[in-house]
Image (cartoon, rainbow, N blue to C red):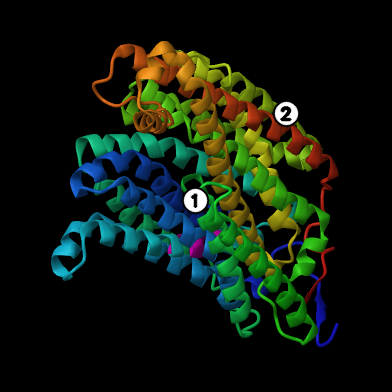
Amino acid sequence: MANAKAVDAPSSPDPGRTGVGGNPWLVLLAVSLGVIMVMLDGTVVGIANPVIQADLKASLSDLQWVTSGYLLALAVFLITAGKLGDLFGHKRVFLIGVAGFAITSVGIGLSAELADIIPGLSPVGALIGLRVLQGLFGALLQPAALALLRGAFPGEKLNQAMGAWGGIIGLSSAAGPIVGGVLVENVSWESVFFINAPVGIIAIVMGVFLIKDNRAQTMARIDWLGVLLLSGAMFSLVWTIIKAPDWGWGDSTTLTFLGAFAVLIAAFVFWQNRAQKIGRQPLVPLSLFRNISISIGTVLMMMVAFAMFGAMFFLGFFFQGVHGLTPLEAGLRMLPMSAGMIVASPLAGMAIGRLGPKITMTAGLLITAFAMFLMSQLSIDASFLASAIPFVLLAFGMSPVFVGATEIIVGNAPLELSGVAGGVQQSAMQVGGALGTAILGAVMAAEISGTLPGYLGPAAQAIPPAQMAGLEKAAAFGVAPPGVPQPIVDAVHQSFMDGMHLAFLVSTGIAVLTALLTLFVKAGRKAEGVQVHVG
């Protein structure tokens, strides 16, 4: 391969090469604070949305953009952000990401005030625009955080670090709904964004003093054509996933965007190979995926995110729509799963260290499948205990998979490409979660459409088609339009349960199939045995 050299990454951190020194566990604490902001933001926004809608007079489309704009920016920019960290230093990129995320969070809380200052800008417009910026900064800090961990911990301790990382993320996920519920109900929706400011300041101070100078190894030119092609491909894919439920999967617009994705990703692969042959440094060296564990780990992360986030998306509607719980009460109902991850993630890291990823991840996926099956049996009036048992099982099933897949992807990548590997891991999770939400949402909607008329009985014949369509859309959220008779409310709830049960059964099957895939995972050779050609 012309003008290329093989790089053998070391198996232990080298402060002169990676720029990460000091106590690695303090580095873990510093980078975790930055990621906690992202996790808190992801959970509290869903709780704040109803209040935001009422306060800013936002439409349903506006609220969708509040979430979709953030998701698009995050998913499109993750791999590029990882590459920026590899080139210009992970500490620098991490701190920029944390600072930008905190500043945009404060700006979101001041959306109404910004609209008063800037002519022609509406509060909702300011909110959406700042959410897009927030996604860009979130993309900067997440791959950089994983790369900093990769450089701080020797290979034999990386799975322990990933386990602790998962526990910290579980803690922030558990705190998110509770903190968000308390703030929204007792302070304001703006306060759920303002809270990122003090967390960000602490993360920056700790990062400056605990993470040693992180200098770029190779100040090579950025592969801007690769950035453009990959960003266009990711945008086309994620945008299709978000909009296809409204357009229809067979609609010409959906097919056009899917076609654009196929063309752009093919052009990206061609250019990455071409860039290496002519001696340029590609955005993503495709030889990275010659390591079978990295490739399988990427697929595993996508499939698990598909099953988990796709199925769990409906639980908020189940608790708040069918049960009529408040946001805080719904958050407390889901606490066993988030709290379980605090315990399960470190244990998963130790288990992977002793038993290897194959046995640990296969067992985790089978436990996950069993937990999903139990949730497919939840009744319409399920007690706290009835939902808590599968939630705890899910925490102990999912944790080995998330910890293992992350360790496989990031741990097997050369140190010089740890940022790109972190971006690949995060992108796989985002795309998998978005796919799961969209596809399982379509499965659920189809089931509701098929079962709702049967639950309505003879009354269904008297409901005009337009009203029936509206009733089906409302049923997908577990609610009935206000003022309808109780028998219709009961029918809506029953059809929602049928749809949710089917979604969990599909997730059960996906977990079992993914367990079979883990049989091909190898323990990996860490970075010392991986050779990747760079220009």
Q: Sort mark 2 into few (<14), some (14-19) or many (20+) by Cα contacts within 10 Å.
A: many
Residue 451's spot in the image, x, y percent?
51, 21
Tell me if 420 is positioned left or right of 188 in this view.
Answer: right
- Taking the spot 54% from the left edge, 73% from the top edge, the residue there is 213
- Magenta span main SS: helix
Marks 2 & 1, CB-CB < 8 Å contact:
no
Q: Of residues 105 and 132, which is closer to you in this image?
A: 132
Q: Is residue 138 magenta?
A: yes
Residue 193's spot in the image, x, y percent?
30, 51
Tell me: residue 34, above or below residue 380.
below
Disc 1: which residue: 242
Q: Of residues 161 and 292, which is closer to you in this image?
A: 292
- Taking the spot 44% from the left edge, 31% from the top edge, the residue there is 476
Q: Is residue 315 visible?
A: yes
Which quadrant: the N terminus?
bottom right
Which span of residues is magenta-colored? 137-143
Q: Is residue 356 visible?
A: no
The label shown at residue 366 is 2
Q: Sort mark 1 into few (<14), some (14-19) or many (20+) by Cα contacts within 10 Å.
A: some
Q: Is residue 333 magenta?
A: no
Marks 2 and 1 sit apart, C-alpha to C-alpha, by 29 Å
Q: Amino acid at mark 1?
A: Ile
- Taking the spot 42% from the left edge, 56% from the top edge, the residue there is 70
Q: Of residues 428 and 440, which is closer to you in this image?
A: 440
Q: Of residues 333 and 467, which is closer to you in this image?
A: 467
Q: Amino acid at mark 2?
A: Leu
The residue mark sitting in front, 2 or 1, is 1
- Taking the spot 23% from the left edge, 21% from the top edge, the residue there is 483
Q: Secondary structure at mark 1?
A: helix
The mark that comes first in sequence, 2 or 1, is 1
